[in-house]
Image (cartoon, rainbow, N blue to C red):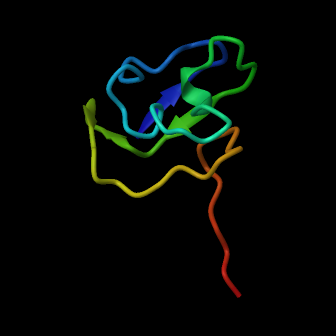
């Protein structure tokens, strides 16, 4: 897991499939204007996991989960 402080940009943003999606909102870890901490579970021990699932659009903290009932 990688924790980015407010304004810190993900070092993997240029090659991360979650940052390069065509959704309306980019991954919040790529935004230098972000004013909150962002946690990315797609980076483990400094390595980017490319087949790690999907990022939920609008997830502002990196901790958002989908709850299905």
x and y, in percent, of residue 50 in the image: 27, 45
Quadrant of the rendering where the N terminus is positioned: top left
Q: Nearer the viewer, residue 26 or 52?
A: 26
* Residue at 38% over, 44% down: 42
In front of the other: 1 or 13: 13
Residue at coordinates 45% horizontally, 32% vertically from top-left?
A: 20
Q: Is residue 56 left or right of residue 11?
A: right
Q: Quadrant of residue 7?
A: top right
Q: Where is residue 38 drawn, in percent x and y?
A: 60, 32
Q: Residue furthest bottom?
A: 69
What residue lies at 61% left-to-right and 52% top-to-bottom? 56
In this rendered view, identify the residue nearer to me: 66 or 38: 66
Identify the residue at image location x=54%, y=22%: 30
Is residue 19 placed above or below 30 in the rendered structure? below
Q: Quadrant of residue 32?
A: top right
Q: Is residue 27 above or below residue 31?
A: below
């Amino acid at each position: 897991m990688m924790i980015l402080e407010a304004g810190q940009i993900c070092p993997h943003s240029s090659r991360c499939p979650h940052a390069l999606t065509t959704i309306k909102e980019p991954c919040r870890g790529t935004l230098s204007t972000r004013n909150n901490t962002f946690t990315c579970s797609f980076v483990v021990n400094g390595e980017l996991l490319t087949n790690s699932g999907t990022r939920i659009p609008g997830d502002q903290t990196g901790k958002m989960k989908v709850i299905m009932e």
